[in-house]
Amino acid sequence: MAPTNVGNEISPEAVEALLQACDDSVGLVRRYYELKRRLMGLSRLAAFDRYAPVGLEKTSTILLEEAQELVVATFAEFSAAMGAVARRAFEDGWVDSPVAQGKCGGAFAYPVPFIHPFILLNWAGSLEGALTLAHELGHGVHQSMSATLPLLVGDVPITLAETASVFGEKLVFAKLMERAGREERLALLCSSIEEIIATSFRQAAITRFEQKLYEARAQGELSVEAVNAMWLSTQKAALGGGIDLGGSYSWWWVYVHHLLRPFYCYGYVFGQVLVLALYARYLEEGKSFAPKYLQLLAAGGSDSPANLLAKLGIDIESPDFWQGGFNGLKGMIEEAEALAAELGC
């Protein structure tokens, strides 16, 4: 694990504080899956039910032009500088959005130093697509604001790479929630909660699996059965008793290609929970938070994550800071439960 920590410029103590916060908050996962079980009308959830959409047929469609204006206006409300970058992305042709034959799937933002980012989308007109647009434009804002840095310090480690993207997505998510009806809000909440669980608790469970795996391998050869058992135990610890992990689930570690890059996955946890905590800080501080946040983006990779975040008064070795992020997730689950009760679910 040490080489990955060095590459990410993060201390072992900070990583453990983050993972421990995940361990301590795993009850939120069980609580949400119990809600999802009721919403789906099942006696028990299977592993494949985790990502089954809940109520997405209740969400409306949105035109690309409307989504663009929503993202630009939302970014500008947070910060005029962020809004200006987002508007320029559309006006200057940074964004390639139409679905086309032969075009690769998904979405991404590709930085080109000293020019501008290039953003690829495959627009399908859904509210989830609007969130994807906000995510990729968040990357674009980050890449633009750090573009004047020297090449060797302009790039950021994975621990900070998703900060601006997930934060931008969170801002637009809040706007969509404001204008949505109850059924649409519940669908949006469930989708967002499941994404957070997948990006934090699941990735943390993969990291705990790796820790067990390498510790055991240092003592001698391992059988496939032993590796399967380690995978199953760490997944059960993260997912709790709300999911049926029977059958072939003990083999699912085989498809996780990130395992070929040891301890890569905790970077996703860092990025997701960091944004939950930063967003909570923004709700507390209001407009005064924006300049400090933009300074973080403009700094790129010019210093370690610990030093950059310390300028915002954040101690990433403190379990209390990471727990603050999960308090935001708890609030989302409580809202989903309340909406489900109102809808008689």
Image: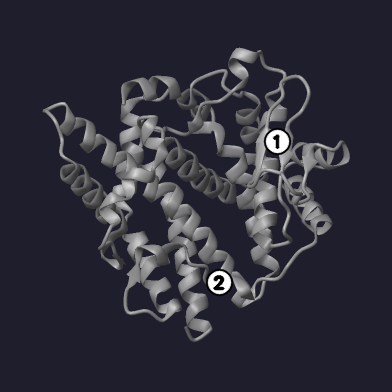
- Taking the image as shown, residue 218 lies to the left or right of residue 244, namely left
Let me know if residue 21 appears in the view. Answer: no
- Taking the image as shown, residue 141 lies to the left or right of residue 22, namely right
Task: Measuring from the top left, give residue 112's x and y in whole percent.
Answer: 72, 24
- Residue sitting at x 42%, y 63%: 50
For label 2, the crowd category at 10 Å Cα-Cα, with few meaning under 14, some 14 to 19 and many 20 or more, is many
Q: Along the line of sight, which residue is nearer the eye, 150 or 239? A: 239
The residue to which callout 2 is attached is 186
Task: Measuring from the top left, give residue 277's x and y in whole percent.
Answer: 49, 45
Q: Residue furthest left?
A: 219
- Residue sitting at x 64%, y 14%: 151
Q: Which mark is residue 316?
A: none
Contact between labelled residues 1 and 2, with CB atoms less than 8 Å apart: no
- Residue sitting at x 32%, y 45%: 253
The residue to which callout 1 is attached is 140
User: Against 24, is 7 above or below?
Assistant: above
User: Against 19, is 114 above or below?
Assistant: above
Q: Amino acid at mark 2?
A: Leu
Task: Measuring from the top left, give residue 273's x and y in whole percent.
Answer: 46, 45
Residues at marks 2 and 1, CA–CA distance in whole angstroms? 29 Å
Q: Residue furthest bottom?
A: 344
Q: Along the line of sight, which residue is nearer the eye, 238 or 297? A: 238
- Taking the image as shown, residue 73 lies to the left or right of residue 274, namely right
Q: Amino acid at mark 1?
A: Gly
> What secondary structure is found at the residue carrying circle 2?
helix
